[in-house]
Amino acid sequence: MTCCPFLPQPTSTPTQDYQVRLQVQGKKLSVGAAGDSIVLVDTSPIKANAAIGALNTLEGRLPRRDRKLTNQAFGRAKKWIKNAAAAGGTSPASRSFSNFGVKGSDARVDIEVIRGDVNLVP
């Protein structure tokens, strides 16, 4: 028995073995504590350039005031991704970055390498 007989049932499930979430959040940001995020999913390792591009997109969505609270955090997150790529990638990990002098609960950038044996590859 299916839960939703009125919805078409998938004939096959695509394999999505690699997943990275990039997020900006904080109670002093216009996006709030729930934040804004981009999830990258693929059947092959997520490239570092794709993750940096996603961070650029998130940063571009923020109003100027919010960018001032997160500019260093975005820079540090991009540097971490570049360093991970230079080392050949990273296994599942979770990292948070905030501006110096700003509490992470107020404004931060998160990188979550959720699935895949190695991600953020060159």
Image (tube, helix red, strand yellow):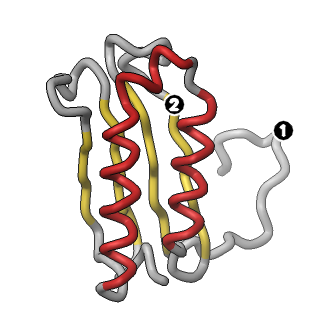
Q: Quadrant of residue 24?
A: top left
Q: Nearer the viewer, residue 95 or 60?
A: 60
Q: Nearer the viewer, residue 101 or 92?
A: 101
Left or right placement of residue 60 versus residue 20 in this view: right
What residue is drawn where x is 45% and y is 60%? 20
Look at the picture and state if 43 lies above or below 37. Answer: below
Element type where label 2 sits in the image:
strand
Left or right placement of residue 13 versus residue 81 in this view: right
Amino acid type, mark 2? Asp
Left or right placement of residue 9 versus residue 102 in this view: right
Counting other residues with Cα less than 10 Å from the Cα at mark 1, is it few (<14), some (14-19), or many (20 or more)? few
Q: Nearer the viewer, residue 2 or 110?
A: 110
Q: CA distance from mark 1 to mark 2?
A: 32 Å
Look at the picture and state if 69 lies above or below 30. Answer: below
Where does label 2 land, which residue? 36
Instruction: Give the x, y percent position of residue 93.
Output: 25, 63
Residues at marks 1 and 2 touching, judged by CB atoms closer than 8 Å: no
What residue is drawn where x is 56% and y is 45%? 38
Look at the picture and state if 73 lies above or below 48. Answer: above
Element type where label 1 sits in the image:
loop
Q: Earlier in the sequence, mark 1 or mark 2?
A: 1
Look at the picture and state if 74 lies above or below 47. Answer: above
Instruction: Give the x, y percent position of residue 43.
Output: 60, 78
Amino acid type, mark 1? Phe
Where does label 1 land, which residue? 6
Q: Quadrant of residue 105?
A: top left
What residue is drawn where x is 45% and y is 19%? 66
